[in-house]
Image (cartoon, rainbow, N blue to C red):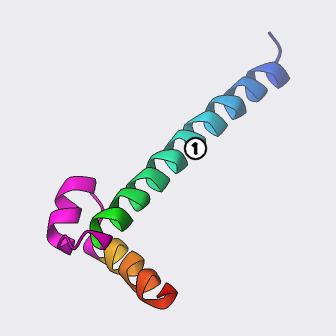
Amino acid sequence: MGTFEMRLRDYERLGRSLGRKEGINTEKRQTARKLLEAGQTVDFISQITGMTAEEILEIQEDLKNEG
């Protein structure tokens, strides 16, 4: 296998890895949003999702701006 093919395979792996991480992050944000809408606290949501309070507060602000 040549250098080009090896690099291509590495980039494909990187792309899949980044895609999985993005998907996981999207799922966490959706879960946090639902929990905020259900009235849960930022601390509780942080414990459940592993997100920081700042990330959750950003979602909370987005919800306020939508409604």
Q: Is residue 48 magenta?
A: yes
Q: Is residue 22 above or below residue 51?
A: above
Report which quarter residue 12 is drawn in. Answer: top right
Residue at 29% across / 71% down in the picture? 36
Q: Tell me which amino acid carries mark 1.
A: Leu
Residue at 49% across / 55% down in the picture? 26
Q: Which residue is mark 1?
A: 18
Q: Nearer the viewer, residue 10 or 15?
A: 15
Relative placement, left or right, of 34 versus 24 is: left
Q: Is residue 6 above or below residue 12?
A: above
Relative placement, left or right, of 5 versus 26 is: right
Q: Nearer the viewer, residue 57 or 7?
A: 57
- The residue sitting at the top extreme is 1
Q: Point out the stretch of residues depicted in magenta.
A: 37-53
Report which quarter residue 58 is drawn in. Answer: bottom left
Where is residue 61 shown, x and y percent of the image?
40, 86
Q: Is residue 32 above or below residue 6?
A: below
For label 1, the SS is: helix
Relative placement, left or right, of 64 versus 1 is: left
Where is residue 4 shown, x and y percent of the image?
84, 24
Q: Is residue 65 above or below residue 50?
A: below
Q: Nearer the viewer, residue 35 or 6?
A: 35
Query: Counting other residues with Cα less than 10 Å from the Cα at mark 1, is it few (<14), some (14-19), or many (20 or more)?
Result: few
Q: Nearer the viewer, residue 33 or 8?
A: 33
The quadrant of the image that shows the N terminus is: top right
